[in-house]
Image (cartoon, helix red, strand yellow):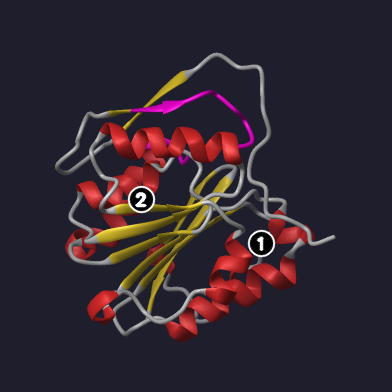
Amino acid sequence: MKKRSIGSQPAEKEAVGLRIIGGKFRGSKLQYTGDNRVRPMKDRVREAVFNLIGPGVKGMYVIDLFGGTGAVAIEAVSRGAAAADVIEIHLPTAFLLQKNIDSLNLSGVCRLQKTDAFYWVKNRSGHPPENKALLVFCSPPYEFYVSRKDEMRAMIDSLYNEAPPGSLFVIEADERFDFATLPVPLEEQRRRSYPPAEIAVFGK
């Protein structure tokens, strides 16, 4: 049986709040059940990531490989990204993600792909409209960097090789991931540590 990239499991936790930090939808609330397997990027980490990306986010085409709540993709669109594909295989999580998209009337801009991220990368066809630069977010369950190490590397390499010039990649991992295996050497100022999260931003 094919191993699936399930990013979350049900959890008995009280709902907590998430918010969009910047741009058009700044201050907007997103729904999150508190499921600890979803692990949405913390506000301060998300803010730091978008500070690293800078104004270049405008007009880019977002690919959020492990969508969770949709906070990262919606944040990018809020700050001027053209559109987004948000991939999430876990159906209860995808249901809530779609509610977050709908709550901001973004269903025509943020497209939810309810499928396996590894499968989607292998089978997607062509580049975004007008060959737009990609803004790729890869924030899987950290354990994937161990149990699915080769698949993770192949997925990142595949997207990097196919991405148009000017594309950016944001990788979130923990200390177990060897950032030296990324397709390009990292500049020191493009790496940040927010334990347990380790963040890297690199371009093409």
Task: Report the residue at 42% width, 73% height from top.
Answer: 187
* Viewport quadrant of the N terminus: bottom right
Disc ID at residue 143:
none
Characterize the local packing of mark 1: few (<14), some (14-19) or many (20 or more) Cα atoms within 10 angstroms: some
Place of residue 15 in the rendered image (x, y in percent of width and height, measured from the top left): 50, 17
Q: Is residue 135 magenta?
A: no
Q: Amino acid at mark 1?
A: Phe
The vertical placement of 98 against 166, above or below, is above
- Residue 73 is tagged as 2
Tag 2: residue type?
Ala
Q: Nearer the viewer, mark 1 or mark 2?
A: 2
The residue wearing badge 1 is 177
Region rendered in magenta: 30-43
Principal secondary structure, stretch drawn in magenta: loop
Q: Earlier in the sequence, mark 1 or mark 2?
A: 2
Judge whether 40 appears above or below 189 on screen. Answer: above
Q: Residue at x 32, y 74 (%)?
A: 128
Q: Whole-Å distance between the Cαs marked 1 and 2?
A: 23 Å
